[in-house]
Amino acid sequence: MKGKNITFIVGAGAVQNAWTPVIRAINKTEGIETNGDGANFLFARYIYLLKFYSTIAKAGKHPEMFEIMKSNIRVLKKNIAVELKKAQNSGEIKPQENFKEIVDKFVISKVDRAYLVTTNWDNVIDLEINKLYRSNNTDANFKIESFHIHGNIESPDELYLPSEITQEIYRTKEEEIKLGSNHGSLISLLEQGNKTVLYGISLDPLDAELNQILGAGISSPNIGEIIIINPCHEIVANRVKLLLDKRYPAKILAYNPNDLSNKIEYN
């Protein structure tokens, strides 16, 4: 319905070859061969070690190990950003083939105002959705406001790795405030929206903070529908149900991205 606000939340599933450059960066940095599952495993382990060494460093023990761990992760993040930029510029990573169809069907044709929230580090979806919107808008300077909830390749040191949260023992107070403010803005955005679309995002258990932010945001009387676009929509729908406040039972609808004509209801 026109006159409504929508929050369009996308993850790696919205981008072709999304993990390929990330895995390439890990292979180059660590000198190993891995895959997407191995990448998440490695990231979570490194964050654990960063917490561990930070804790013992604050107790006056082995501060050099903390500095080595910080340096290693900083190098890894920088290499990830480099590989993602190369892949973005070359077209190796790009929106899924039916991205335009999805945006036309669930975003552009349904509302007057949309906000993009992405867990991706690259800018592929930001660029593409604004190109699509400008083709439907007479204002050449029109731009959709976007939130990179896990950081952006333009600032490699600020990339969020799986299992990280805002209040980490190794963060400065300034970093915590900046991240907390960003997440607070997202919650407010979700609360004010009338519809939330989740495309290519699984709500992975490793992203506990993101899941809590989403849960806080969609627990609002304003939200009428939550639309899931994912091949594994049953898993995502179950996770969304666990986040919803029973006082505000938004309708949960789902689609397989390869069959947008078949609507599944989960309420």
Image (cartoon, helix red, strand yellow):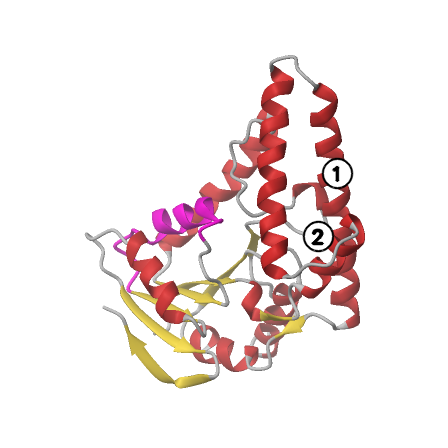
170 sits to left or right of 81: left
Q: Secondary structure at mark 1?
A: helix
As rendered, which of 91 and 18 lies closer to the eye?
Answer: 18
Callout 2 amino acid: Ile
The residue that appears at 45% across and 44% down in the rendered structure is 209
For label 2, the crowd category at 10 Å Cα-Cα, with few meaning under 14, some 14 to 19 and many 20 or more, is: many
Q: Gap between marks 2 and 1, in whole Å?
A: 17 Å
Residue farthest to the top, as pictured: 60
> What is the number of the mark on residue 72?
1
Q: Secondary structure at mark 2?
A: loop
14 to 54, vertically: above or below: below
Callout 1 amino acid: Asn
Query: Mark 2 highlights which residue?
Result: 153
Residue numbers of the magenta segment: 205-224
77 sits to left or right of 106: right
Q: Earlier in the sequence, mark 2 or mark 1?
A: 1
60 to 264, vertically: above or below: above
The residue that appears at 61% across and 16% down in the rendered structure is 58
Give yes or no for contact between labels 2 and 1 (Cβ–Cβ under 8 Å).
Answer: no
Q: Where in the figure is residue 195, as x and y percent of width and height? A: 36, 64
